[in-house]
Amino acid sequence: MPSAFTLGNLYLGLLAIVLVISGLHWRNASFVIILGMFLDGLDGRLARLLDVTSSFGRDLDSLADVITFGVAPAVLLIYLQPNDALAHVAAALYVSCGAIRLARFNTQSAPLQGHFTGLPITAAGGISATATLYAGTIPAWLLPAAYLALAALMVSRIPYPDFKKVSLPHSGALLVVAILASVIVLWFARRLIFIPLVLYALFGLGWHGALWRRLPAQWRIRYEKQKALRLKRRQEKKARQKK
């Protein structure tokens, strides 16, 4: 069942791309991407609820995410600004950083419990998709600039809460009702969804200090050790290149 939701997320990514390419319903593509966010949040929780988590499901989820929240928003940006070189560069960097973010997540041996390292591509996809709804009412350069900022946040080392402890209703009927109600709210409030998603992204641009102080001491120590090790490796690499 969790993999079925993941494949549904993948199909929504494909559908969003088709809607953009058709040129008739590109605004609906943003809603489809937001709906993909919803399915992406369900598959992992269902896997934990049914105790069927696996590396296969994790990798399949990442492949679906790079399409729905990476490629689809990038196609949407290029469609809106096809002759803007900055838009093409921003779209390329956005997809690349999203793929790097997912690869890093899948290969992390000891991630921080309860937090992501860097902005999740799911949130970045939601922000970029809903931001396009404001195209025409904001300066043209602002949209690709937002994509570049999201790309940088995805590959950053800023901790973001993962909300994995938020559980699903155990009643099947209640779960179905909750899903249908959420889809209806997403349809009518897709522009407003942009606000909480941006606030979540901004959480790491200065407000994460409050979160950092609340992390257990051993997590902070491990993070600092990993950071020092990465710095040492970069210095050793530079030294070898000079030789």
Image (cartoon, rainbow, N blue to C red):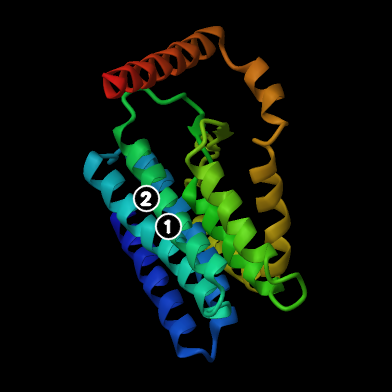
Q: Name above or below for residue 205 compared with residue 123.
A: above
Secondary structure under badge 1?
helix
Q: Could you tell me which residue is drawn at 63 percent across and 58 percent down?
A: 145
Tell me where residue 224 appears, x and y as whole percent. Answer: 49, 13
Q: Is residue 95 left or right of residue 138?
A: left
Which residue is nearer to you in this view: 22 or 182? 22
Q: Give residue 68's quadrant in the image.
A: bottom left
Tell me where residue 59 appears, x and y as whole percent. Answer: 27, 47
Q: Is residue 4 left or right of residue 212?
A: left
Q: Could you tell me which residue is drawn at 47 percent across and 46 percent down?
A: 170
Q: CA distance from mark 2 to mark 1?
A: 6 Å
Q: Which residue is mark 2?
A: 99
Which residue is nearer to you in this view: 225 or 181? 225
Q: Is residue 156 left or right of residue 142?
A: left
Secondary structure under badge 2?
helix
Q: Give residue 183's quadrant in the image.
A: bottom right
Report the amino acid beneath label 1: Val
Any mark on residue 95, and which?
Answer: 1
Which residue is nearer to you in this view: 126 or 98? 98
Report the amino acid beneath label 2: Ala
